[in-house]
Image: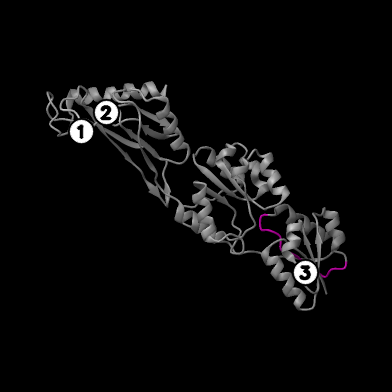
Amino acid sequence: MKAVVFSGTTEGRVFSRQLAALGAEVLVSVATPLGAEEQGKADGITVHCGRLTPEEMTALLQGAALCVDATHPYAVDATKNIRAACAVAGVEYHRLLREESPLPAGSMVFATAAHAAAFLAGCSGNVLLATGAKELAAFAALSPERLFPRVLPTREGIAACEAAGIPHKNIIAMQGPFSYALNCALIKQFSIRYLVTKDGGAVGGFAEKAQAAQDTGAQLIVVIFHWGNETETVPDSNQTTLGRMAIDLGADLVCGHHPHVLQGIETYKGKNIVYSLGNFCFGGNKNPSDKDTMIFQQTFTVENGKLAEDDVTNIIPCSLSSESGYNNYQPMVLEGSEKERVLQKIEDLSTAINQ
């Protein structure tokens, strides 16, 4: 019996060898030289290498009693063409399927790569793309600096990254599947905030990717900076640059101190940068002229392992001393007109930054 196996996957290689061991004459079709290299040589198996048109598939099927489609689960066009070729050639068609993988808590599922890209456009942080070189175009709207595509170590894979404007330092050209440890190492090395992958099943290393993402992903990142110029109520360019950079790299909240006075709060990409909290319990001056300070509270909600996009904040105006004429090192919460004065002061300073 002659059988044609359209392969290029781990299960396709295993199945073709098992079929040949049963005495079948097996013709394996793979699209790339890498696929042929991985298929290797075995008794009873002939390998055809190269992408085929539907007409060429039909010709390849002549004389076969059976066709098994063992292409990648997401090779939709290939499966469509193989089905059509079998119908024309009158050859029995079978699809070799992979089991769906369980998803870890907090996973988000999108219908297409384009839908995933649209979601990521509203987020900050680096992205590990484990979706293959062919899907890079879907992420064109994102800054290439954020993208770390993992592609096959072929000219075609690297050329696709270059065409997408991906910096060479971001290209991960390796052949999978990847171990849990290697996935963790890559996520940490490149400060990955989001992992985008397809469900490649057990043979595609999906479980190892999912577990690595879950175990290395920090749900909440708060960055504290010691920065700015003393007694200045307006943040300098270094503060604004570093604060925004921290948000771009995945921080959920940035707080600063050192100026010894209050500075405004900037809302950047939906996240808060509190440039200076002022003094609180401060022993460096017996009677500072500016005793205004605050407690900044922000509540974060984690739902199903994912940080909710809420912004529940509360500002509590304070004085660093409970005595107005000197510093007794006993901060107190302000009430009445003094509370309103400090709240207005913070609002004015913040408005100047957010204009």
Image location (x, y in percent) of residue 235: 37, 25
Would residue 143 be found to the left or right of residue 295 on screen? right
Image location (x, y in percent) of residue 231: 28, 23
Q: Residue furthest bottom?
A: 22
**Residue topped by disc 2:** 260
* Cα distance between the residues tagged 3 and 2: 73 Å
Q: Identity of the amino acid at label 2?
A: His
Task: Specify which label sits upstream in the sequence, 3 or 2.
Answer: 3
What are the residue bounds of the magenta stretch?
Answer: 63-74
Task: Specify which label sits upstream in the sequence, 1 or 2.
Answer: 2
Q: Are marks 1 and 2 in contact (CB under 8 Å)?
A: yes
Q: Residue at x 80, y 56 (%)?
A: 50
Would residue 273 be found to the left or right of residue 207 on screen? left
Task: Specify which label sits upstream in the sequence, 1 or 3.
Answer: 3
Q: Residue 282's mark?
A: 1
Q: Is residue 326 above or below residue 167?
A: above
Q: Identity of the amino acid at label 3?
A: Lys
**Residue topped by disc 3:** 41
* Cα distance between the residues tagged 1 and 2: 9 Å
User: Secondary structure beneath disc 1?
Assistant: loop
Q: Specify the quadrant of the image occupied by residue 100.
A: bottom right
Would residue 211 be found to the left or right of residue 257 on screen? right
Q: Is residue 134 above or below residue 7?
A: above
User: Secondary structure beneath disc 2?
Assistant: loop
Q: Residue furthest front?
A: 284
